Amino acid sequence: MNARANTPSLEAFWMPFTANRQFKAAPRLLAAAQGMYYTSDDGRRVLDGTAGLWCVNAGHGRRQITEAVERQLSTLDFAPTFQMGHPIAFDFAERLAAIAPGGLDRVFFTNSGSESVDTALKIAIAYQRAIGQGTRTRVIGRERGYHGVGFGGITVGGLVNNRRVFPLLPGADHLRHTHDPARNAFTKGGLPAHGAELADDLERLVALHGAETIAAVIVEPMAGSTGVLLPPQGYLQRLREIATRHGILLIFDEVITGFGRLGAPFATDYFGVTPDLVTTAKGITNGTIPMGAVFASRKVHDGLMTGPEAAIELFHGYTYSGHPVACAAGLATLDIYAEEGLLTRAAELAPHWEAAMHSLRDLPNVVDIRTIGLVAGIELSSREGAPGARAYDVFVDCFNKGLLVRVTGDIIALSPPLIAETQHIDDLAAMLGDALKRAA
Ligand SMILES: Cc1ncc(COP(=O)(O)O)c(C=O)c1O
């Protein structure tokens, strides 16, 4: 099936979120990575326009992380965190608490974004019950939201392909999404002007279901995976206000926006809106070792620290919650972020980034360009009867020419490592521009 030298058989690995048969007929393999670049298995340099999968914020091949992981593996490779502890998990939680979004300084460790989302939903429901609001079991998401692939996450998620085959949690409902290119296309220099009123959907769902049935509402402050959808001006503030008024917990899914992507440590800081729970993963270890964390407010945490002292307060956790090696990777990652100012660097790069991305505006089939921090979404018109095909061709073309981009439907999403220099941004824009010109 695959004629390349030194390449193993591709048969056994059932690839996630991949057209397996198409991929294996014409594979794209990455063999090494350093700094801003991957090296493909045939020896080509590929500029990483996506920080891997929105996770390698400090760039590839960071020695400090490698050495911390090596040290930890040879000191304490694994230890349980159920009714036991090890110092590095507490250290890492304290370090995270010190930069916690909106001061949410109680930290529950997971191993992925999906686990963080399901954990946050469970914490929200458990909290409501603990404070005497046991009828609040309903969770609200948003259309076009992506919250990973657990049953909780796909329930509150808003992508039909992730949902249609699977049974979902009962009672969930959705806000409408905020994507409105008819009014907001090519917004520059800030958030889209139109759509704050869409937050009132929460009011509508309260009227429909009763506030006393709703535990939490979860949104991505900036929806990344579904095509870089920015919150309209005032939207998040309004959602916060409505949720508070009705005793509904607000969860921000910051699996992508956490750890500097928008130019502030978290989107919570960037937008100045404080939720009750924040989910993270990805950049927490620079993508090196799987890990996630849920940040909870004191109110939520302390609300569950009741009952007999000998009783477990939350029947939830993972074998690898607070895995020592992941904590070591995370601590070294936080050191790099602090030493190199990476949690705010996107703010410095944002004007150059925005200008570079908007320079693609007049290329064929470009119908919208959206940027925030060091993120961009470039939306293309779809080919008749073949949604997604045009962007997919651009993705393959870019890879063959030395640039990794990501596509969702006919939207190209870009999120390079936060160590990018302006030259990388210019190279990225030039390569993408050429590919857009070639795409019919
Ligand atoms: C907002 C958001 N939530 C959750 C997830 C799921 O994370 P994971 O793939 O680590 O489970 C993602 C992944 O891209 C995401 O973007």
Image (cartoon, rainbow, N blue to C red):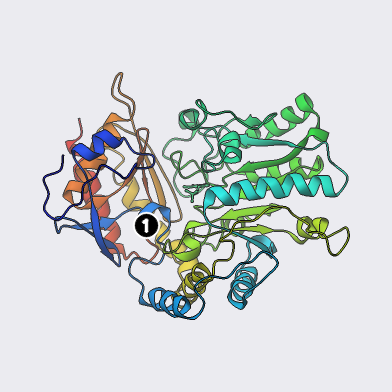
Kindly tell me whether residue 383 is visible in this rendering: yes
Q: Position of residue 146 (x, y in %)?
A: 52, 40
Ligand 1 is within 8 Å of the C-beta of the residue at disc 1: no
The C terminus is located in which quarter? top left
Q: Residue at x 44, y 66 (%)?
A: 345
Q: Residues within 10 Å of mark 1 (few under 14, many from 20)?
A: many
Front residue (pair 323, 267): 323
The amino acid at mark 1 is: Ala
Q: Position of residue 167 (x, y in %)?
A: 58, 28
Q: Residue at x 27, y 61 (%)?
A: 424
Q: Is residue 63 left or right of residue 191?
A: left
Establish if 133 lies above or below 47: above
Secondary structure beneath label 1: helix
Q: Quadrant of residue 245?
A: top right
Q: Position of residue 12 (x, y in %)?
A: 29, 44
The N terminus is located in which quarter? top left
Q: Quadrant of residue 219?
A: top right
Circle 1 sits on which residue? 51
Q: Is residue 17 left or right of residue 285?
A: left
